[in-house]
Image: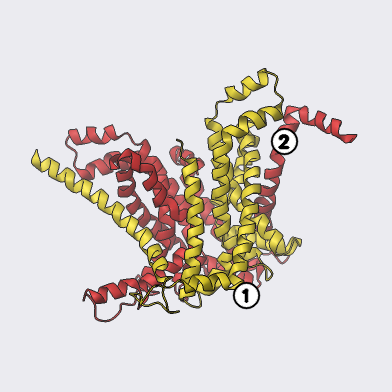
């Protein structure tokens, strides 16, 4: 009881109060975010201080896996952006105003659903006896079921692989809603009068798109790209469920090192190398003023 | 003139068509899984030979799945309520506190770490930390991991709402002699009310469906619903799993749509 008044007195001071209130969430963020990242950095130079782990990353399949993961991330983000542009343009400019928010809510609802389940649904769509094959056979388009699951396509000469249809579909299903959300915000801010003015001056569809819509929305698109490509490149569950064993992604390697091989130092070096690439991407993107302010909105 | 309106029609049709195709793409798989969950046989064939609810009964009678569902729900309730309370403190710090600007920026950056750092890197970091520092694996580490994961969402949702609030209202209450606590409970909290409820619902959905951090922190003692599903999905595709998936989708969608409805300004 005797401490109560003094505690209250301390709390009266504005700066002390603000600091104490900030300390609770800050502790959580530091203890589970900042400290683990620092520990990973230290761990990656173990045992003692050695660069062996990083040298190991540059050997064997690891560079190829990281490159392939980044390729998948960029490829799919570009595909998602290509879909998000016309959809959000329609939503922001053509859709009747009272349907706008409900439609946006439905387009972004998958963000809140379980992505393990969402990935799993594609097995039923694309399997040999799945919906798509049954429909195609029924319509007489094919006589034998197509192998739609787990068949990646290797690009000759460059060492990169276009993932299987199932993995592409699974990734788009999960990450397209992110880009629909960010692109909608950009499209909504686009002054539609600019589009009309360009049309009045005789610009065709392509020129309107290239000279008006792209410049006005580029910052939002780049910010979305930076966030989403890194998430796809670092995804674990989706390639496990829909990908092929022969083409692992970087998160699968990290998880294996942690779970099965129990090689924490190497797993840390692998993670830090991946993180470094992602951070460099952000650093380059954030040098552009508009992109930086877009990133802050995330 | 007619040529112009034709091209405008084509253009309009193109935008509408991509939207419709996108809708089909996002929802056809979901509709499929729900449809197949009503199969009478354990391996559904298309079209279904009949309609049966027996797999739903089977899921709800399955001890492992029910336990996973209950564990996930308990963790999600803790993560949602505590995460929203912490988010409120964080949002207040970012928008209203008198700490120096650079402190507040650094604070916001630390909170935002899960949004920018790839989840697998964070999950490994937290897993390695739990293993080396000795917090260990299990229920409490998973709860802490989820709190950390939902904190940026509650914080930035509430920051946006805080920024819209007219701080003259709080000022007025203070001028009329209300203490800091009274201002908070009688002015600020009621104004933030809908945003707080939305935050609880959204963070519930996030935590309820979180997979990767849990995967690194659960150890052998705790099995949440997404872990349970992930284990099964990789082995077999059955009517049981379709019914279980449908239940999970239904819960998540109901929670998220309620949150969306509340967040939408009326």
Rendering quarter of residue A137: bottom left
Give the residue furthest to the top: B176
Q: Are marks 2 and 1 on the same chain?
A: yes
| Quadrant for the N terminus of chain A in the image | top right
Which chain gets the yellow colouring? B
Q: Is residue B68 above or below residue B83?
A: below
Q: How many marks?
A: 2
Query: Which residue is rendered at x = 59% and y = 59% of the image?
Result: B121
Q: Which residue is mark 1?
A: A260
Q: Is residue A200 above or below residue B220?
A: above
Q: Name the front one of labels 2 and 1.
A: 2
Colour for chain A in the figure: red
Q: Residues within 10 Å of mark 1 (few under 14, many from 20)?
A: few
The answer to which of B161 and B190 lies nearer the viewer is B190
Give the residue furthest to the left: B2
Q: Which chain letter matches label 1? A: A
Residue A152 in picture, x, y percent from top left:
38, 72
Label 1: which secondary element? loop
Query: Which residue is rendered at x = 50% and y = 75% of the image?
Result: B234
The answer to which of A98 and A195 lies nearer the viewer is A98
Q: Is residue A221 visible?
A: no
Query: Which residue is rendered at x = 54% and y = 65% of the image?
Result: A251
Residue B102 in picture, x, y percent from top left:
63, 34
Q: Which residue is mark 2?
A: A19
Rendering quarter of residue A220: top left
Residue A264 in picture, x, y percent from top left:
66, 67
Query: Which residue is rendered at x = 42% and y = 66% of the image?
Result: B34
Q: Which chain letter matches label 2? A: A
């Amino acid at each position: 009881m005797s401490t109560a008044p003094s505690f209250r007195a301390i709390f009266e001071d504005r700066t002390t109060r603000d600091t104490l209130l900030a300390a609770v969430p800050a502790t959580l963020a530091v203890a589970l975010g900042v400290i683990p990242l620092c520990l990973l950095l230290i761990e990656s130079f173990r045992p003692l201080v050695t660069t062996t782990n990083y040298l190991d990353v540059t050997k064997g399949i690891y560079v190829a896996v990281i490159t392939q993961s980044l390729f998948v991330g960029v490829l799919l983000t570009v595909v998602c952006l290509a879909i998000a542009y016309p959809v959000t343009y329609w939503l922001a400019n053509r859709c009747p105003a009272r349907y706008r928010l409900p439609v946006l809510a439905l387009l972004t609802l998958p963000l809140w659903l379980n992505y393990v389940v969402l990935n799993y649904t594609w097995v039923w769509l694309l399997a040999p006896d799945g919906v798509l094959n049954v429909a195609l056979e029924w319509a007489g388009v094919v006589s034998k079921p197509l192998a739609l699951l787990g068949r990646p396509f290797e690009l000759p000469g460059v060492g990169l692989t276009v993932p299987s249809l199932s993995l592409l579909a699974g990734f788009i299903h999960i990450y397209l809603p992110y880009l629909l959300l960010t692109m909608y915000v950009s499209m909504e801010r686009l002054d539609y009068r600019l589009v009309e003015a360009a049309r009045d001056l005789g610009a065709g569809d392509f020129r309107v798109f290239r000279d008006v819509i792209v410049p006005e929305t580029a910052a939002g698109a780049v910010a979305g790209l930076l966030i989403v490509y890194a998430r796809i490149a670092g995804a674990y569950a989706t390639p496990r469920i829909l990908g092929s064993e022969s083409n692992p992604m970087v998160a699968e390697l990290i998880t294996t090192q942690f779970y099965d091989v129990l090689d924490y130092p190497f797993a840390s070096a692998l993670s830090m190398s991946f993180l470094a690439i992602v951070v460099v991407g952000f650093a380059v993107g954030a040098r552009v003023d508009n992109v930086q302010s877009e990133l802050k909105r995330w | 003139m007619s040529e112009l309106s034709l091209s405008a029609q084509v253009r309009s049709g193109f935008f509408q068509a991509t939207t419709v195709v996108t809708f089909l793409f996002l929802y056809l798989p979901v509709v499929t899984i729900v449809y197949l969950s009503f199969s009478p046989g354990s391996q559904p064939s298309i079209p279904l030979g009949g309609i049966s609810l027996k797999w739903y009964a089977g899921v709800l009678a399955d001890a492992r799945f029910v336990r996973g569902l209950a564990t996930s729900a308990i963790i999600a309730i803790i993560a949602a309520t505590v995460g929203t309370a912490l988010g409120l403190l964080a949002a207040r710090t970012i928008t209203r506190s008198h700490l120096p600007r650079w402190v507040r920026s650094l604070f916001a950056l630390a909170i935002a770490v899960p949004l920018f750092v790839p989840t697998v890197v964070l999950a490994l970091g937290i897993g390695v930390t739990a293993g080396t520092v000795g917090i260990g694996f299990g229920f409490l580490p998973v709860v802490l991991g989820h709190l950390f994961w939902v904190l940026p969402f509650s914080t930035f949702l509430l920051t946006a709402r805080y920024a819209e609030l007219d701080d003259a209202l709080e000022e007025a209450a203070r001028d009329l002699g209300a203490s800091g606590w009274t201002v908070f409970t009688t002015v600020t909290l009621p104004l933030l009310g809908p945003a707080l409820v939305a935050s609880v619902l959204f963070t519930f959905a996030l935590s309820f469906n979180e997979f990767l951090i849990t995967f690194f922190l659960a150890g052998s003692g705790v099995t949440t619903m997404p872990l349970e599903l992930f284990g099964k999905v990789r082995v077999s595709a059955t009517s049981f799993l379709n019914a279980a998936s449908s239940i999970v989708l239904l819960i998540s969608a109901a929670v998220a749509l309620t949150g969306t409805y509340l967040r939408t300004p009326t």
